[in-house]
Amino acid sequence: MKYSLSPIPGRGLTIALSGELDINTVDGLRTVFEHLVALEVRHIEINLRGLRMIDSLGVGALLGFYKRIRAQGGEVVLRECGGQPMAILHLVHFDRFMMAPSDGRSLGGDGPARTG
């Protein structure tokens, strides 16, 4: 898995993920998340456009990060999710609490998870 960080002027930052987020790569992402929690970044958008696969450890890392940022009064949203990651994240209902405004490929939206 690879990642890149980009500022969102006046708001926070975007983390773009690519590759696979699984048992072999999750520790690197957790380290990044730890730094962002320590810096008290309040608004974080995680772009999943390049993410091909996520496993249960990756889901757990996203959830843990979300909870820690929320506890600091911040927000985390997922954007541009597709394929296997979207199927997994819908299955565990991330679309109900890590919503992004609809931009055509965002994970999220109002109401229950989409099917089909």
Image (spheres, helix red, strand yellow):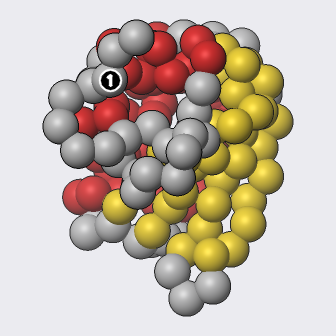
Report x, y in % for residue 10.
55, 88
35 left or right of 17?
left
Whether residue 27 is visible, yes or no, is: yes
Judge the density around disc 1: few (<14), some (14-19), many (≥20) Cα neighbours within 10 Å. Answer: few
Looking at the image, which residue sits at the far left?
Answer: 111
- Classify the position of the C terminus by image quarter: top left
Q: For the point 41% across and 71% down, which residue is it?
A: 42
6 left or right of 108?
right
Q: Is residue 60 above or below residue 64?
A: above
- Classify the position of the N terminus by image quarter: top right
52 left or right of 84?
right
What residue did someone put label 1 on?
A: 114
Q: For the point 44% across and 51% down, which residue is it?
A: 102
Q: Provide the secondary structure element on which disc 1 rests.
A: loop
What amino acid does circle 1 point to? Answer: Arg
Q: Decide which of 20, 67 is in the foreground and name it.
A: 20
Q: For the point 24% across and 37% down, which residue is it?
A: 96
Report x, y in % for residue 93.
27, 25
Whether residue 38 is visible, yes or no, is: no
Q: Is residue 76 above or below residue 66?
A: below
Q: For the point 23% across and 58% down, which residue is it?
A: 71
Tally of marks: 1
Q: Decide which of 105, 18 is in the foreground and name it.
A: 105
Looking at the image, which residue sits at the far bottom?
Answer: 10
Report x, y in % for residue 52.
72, 19
115 left or right of 14?
left
Report x, y in % for residue 14.
63, 60
Q: Decide which of 56, 33 is in the foreground and name it.
A: 56
Q: Is residue 88 above or below residue 30?
A: above
